[in-house]
Image (tube, rainbow, N blue to C red):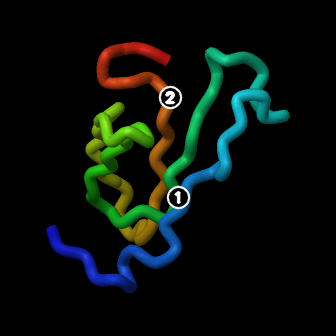
Amino acid sequence: MKYSENDLDGIGVVPNPYYINHQNQRSPYDAQLYFTKLPKECTIDIYTMAGDLVKTIEHKTTADGQRRAVQVWDLISKNGFR
């Protein structure tokens, strides 16, 4: 599916920047990032600064009438590492 610039406006990541000692994070095992204001369907690719693929998330909203959605990532890589 193709999206216009207007469709992609407002997409965000929370918290940004992410700090490992974030006040709402009780332990390293409950760490989460939130991708916000996503279109109904999209692919999220997460890379390291060196350009290595960490994780691919296929996002699909099933709720009818919901224009924008949130996807949660638990910071676990495609290889199962935190």
**Residue 63: mark in rendering:** none
Res. 58 image quadrant: top left
Q: Between residues 31 and 51, which one lies in front from this camera angle?
A: 51
Asked whether 73 or 54 is in front, the reply is 54
* Residue positioned 65% across, 52% down in the render: 16
Identify which residue is drawn at 38% across, 24% down: 77
- At x 37%, y 42%, the residue is 46
Identify the residue position indicated by label 2 in the image.
75
Identify which amino acid the numbered label 2 is placed on: Leu
Q: Secondary structure at mark 2?
A: loop
Residue linked to disc 1:
36
Task: Tell me the crowding category of disc 2: few under 14, some 14 to 19, or many 20 or more residues within 10 angstroms, Cα based.
Answer: some
Which residue is at a point 38% across and 39% down the rendered structure image?
A: 50
Query: Which comes before the other along the chain, label 1 or label 2?
Result: 1
Of residue 65 and residue 20, the one placed in the foreground of this image is 20
Q: Nearer the viewer, residue 38 or 17?
A: 17
- Single out the residue that lies furthest toward the front: 50
Q: Residues within 10 Å of mark 1 (few under 14, many from 20)?
A: some
Residue 18, horizontal then vertical, whole percent: 66, 42
Q: Is residue 35 above or below residue 25?
A: below
Dot 1 and dot 2 residues touching (CB under 8 Å): no
Q: Of the residues shown, which amino acid type is indicated by label 1?
A: Thr
Left or right, residue 57 beside residue 67: left
Q: For this view, does 71 lie left or right of residue 78?
A: right
x and y, in percent, of residue 33 in the image:
57, 41
Q: Is 31 situated left or right of 38 in this image?
A: right
Q: Which quadrant of the view contains residue 1?
A: bottom left
Q: Position of residue 49 (x, y in %)?
A: 44, 42
CA distance separating discs 1 and 2 = 16 Å
The outermost residue toward the right is: 23
